[in-house]
Amino acid sequence: MKTPIRPRYASLLAAACLVPLLGCMGSSSGSTYYDNATSVAVADLDGNGRMDVVTAYDRAYSDGTDGGFVSTRMGQGTTGIAFGDPIRSTGGAAPGPIVVANLDGNAQPDLVLCNAVSPTVTLLYGSATPGTFGSSVNLSLGANRYAYAVAVADFNGDGKQDIAVAASGGSDVLVFLQNAGGGFTGVTPTSVAVGATPYSIAAGALSGGNQDLAVGLNGGQLAILKGNGDGTFQTPVNYACGTTPASIKIADLDGANGPDIAVADYGATSSVIVFLNSGGGSFATGVSYPTGDSYALDLAIGDLNGDTKPDIAVANSGVPGDPGSVSVLLNTGSGAFGTATLYGGLQGPTSVSIADIDGDGRNDLISADGTGVIHLQSPTTPGQFLAPVQLYY
């Protein structure tokens, strides 16, 4: 059985690197290492209208130590898969989930990285050269606390983006509020009790006003914490949620009652569990949709067939020895989803995003799967995707 979640990327990637893979192996100062993509994010970093791809990599050395970096591929041209050369920025320690956010309010997007082998969250601040990241800050989580996931939002209404962390080693979420003058220097996190170890987290205006939190808990629970608008949160309300809620995304899936929640449930038989908002941040019982594969680690939401309804893509890392897959579940209306269609992985997808990569007006799939991997949407058959294209780093 695979070790659930954390250090989820460290354990999965250690297994993946037992067999050398083309483009992943190297050596430095006599020590062999393997590079493996752990997470991918897509954003227009330079404002040119083309989507850029940021991929976090774990560099696992043969002596048992880990490093990390991000590789940025800047979108170029007007059509097709066209990227500039990879731009590497050092950062993180076996970094896993990555979030693009504007932490300092300038024109350059920043990165937030979860670290699998350091009890910190790393912030990489964007520089004046798009695709590069300059200064870095490590937020300390405390002894034996390792980040599974982060959510970035303005939790206290001061116009600055704050960070909430789901981390091992405690039954709470750690909330970092920016200083009055901006930045996180000297900030001590606030502990927000959730009753069990949090595996995943997302933020959104679930109740229609302040930023709320949805937290996936050990033992198969989804905790909803309504925000008070001042950086504090109300007592959690829990919903049954599979066995191991590995990833959470928030979006309006049915066009009614506000944002809904989709959860990737990690297990030998994985599923997506959908919670539709009943209004005011209360939710109907979750409905489970099989992903068709094993050990789902991440999901993304977006229109994948051009009908304007939000669909779901899931990164399934697969059983040992199997390359896993990306599942696509199309929205059939009113927040219900059809049978999953699987697109085979290369080394076991650990992360997935949705964006229009080639500028044709159709959303594509981007995954972390050994390297960054793109599945373009078919130009003739909406909702179907073409053979994988690897993005070397």
Image: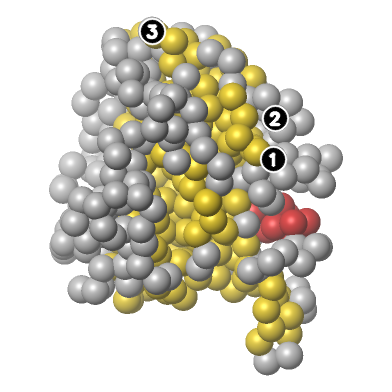
Q: Are marks 1 and 2 in contact (CB under 8 Å)?
A: yes
In the image, 333 versus 246, the foreground residue is 333
User: Looking at the image, which residue is at 52% across and 9% down?
Assistant: 285
Q: Are marks 2 and 3 in contact (CB under 8 Å)?
A: no
Q: Residue furthest front?
A: 380
Q: Dot 3, crowdedness within 10 Å: few (<14), some or many (≥20)? A: few
User: Looking at the image, which residue is at 46% across and 66% down?
Assistant: 70
The residue under label 1 is 324
Mark whose residue sits in front, 1 or 3:
1
Query: Which element type, helix, strand or loop, lies under badge 3?
Result: loop
What is the three-letter code of the residue carrying label 2? Asp
120 with respect to 160 (left or right): right
Residue 369 location, x and y as percent? 60, 51
Residue 73 location, x and y as percent? 39, 63
* C-alpha gap between disc 1 and disc 2: 7 Å
* C-alpha gap between disc 1 and disc 3: 29 Å
* C-alpha gap between disc 2 and disc 3: 25 Å
User: Looking at the image, which residue is at 44% across and 10% down?
Assistant: 332
Residue 38 location, x and y as percent? 57, 55
Q: Dot 2, crowdedness within 10 Å: few (<14), some or many (≥20)? A: many
For the question of whether residue 132 can be seen, the reply is yes
User: Looking at the image, which residue is at 69% across and 40% down?
Assistant: 324
Query: Which of disc 3 and disc 1 is earlier in sequence?
Result: 1
Residue 33 location, x and y as percent? 70, 76
What is the three-letter code of the residue carrying label 1? Gly
The residue under label 2 is 293
The residue under label 3 is 334
For the question of whether residue 228 can be seen, the reply is no
